[in-house]
Image: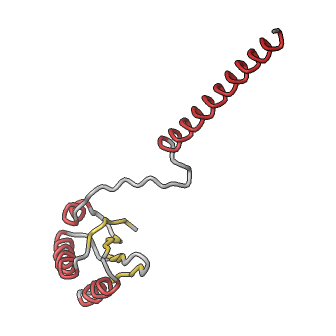
Amino acid sequence: MKGLKKMGLAAIVGFAAASIVTKKLYEKKKDKELDEFLLPEEDETIVIHIESSLEDDMKQIKSSPVLFLFTMDSKEQAMLFQDLLAQKGLSSTIDVNTNGIEVMFNDEINEVNKSDLLKSLLEISHKTNAKYEGYHLK
């Protein structure tokens, strides 16, 4: 009888220990998933995209040189965009991996130049379906 009680007690203790371990593993897995969701890994870059328009950005520019960033759907569109820029006397570079174009503007920043540049960039981007991404001051 004592042996049976000891075996029953051992079974209850074993069952309790197994359920505690299972609960801890479940909680650990749940915490890990929550951490991955709330705390991205250090290597992950967080990008916040703020929509801007070429017209609005042009109003804010006060000095040169300025790099205007555009993207195209294809390499052919990017090359056409660059050719049209060259015809207007604007220098640019193509990123063949992303079909992105950087348009460099080095002239004096005044209302006439800004207006001419805006007109040229809008015309060329409309012809080539280029998407304006923003600008950087050099």
Q: Tell me which residue sits at (30%, 66%) in the image.
A: 133
Q: In this view, does 120 lie to the left or right of 23?
A: left
Q: Tell me which residue sits at (24%, 90%) in the image.
A: 87
53, above or below 1, in the image: below
Where's residue 2, x and y in %? 83, 9
* Placement of the C terminus among the 4 image quadrants: bottom left
46, above or below 69, in the image: above
Depth order, front residue of 104/108: 104
Where's residue 106, x and y in %? 33, 76
78, above or below 38, in the image: below
The answer to which quarter of the image holds residue 110 is bottom left
Q: Is residue 54 left or right of residue 21?
A: left
Residue at the outermost front position? 1
Depth order, front residue of 109/93: 93
Depth order, front residue of 40/67: 40
Residue at the outermost right position? 3
Where's residue 36, x and y in %? 52, 44
Q: Tell me which residue sits at (26%, 58%) in the image.
A: 51
* Count of all numbered marks drawn on residues in the image: 0
Q: In this view, does 90 lie to the left or right of 45?
A: left
Q: Tell me which residue sits at (25%, 75%) in the image.
A: 130
Where's residue 66, x and y in %? 34, 70
- How was this image coloured? secondary structure
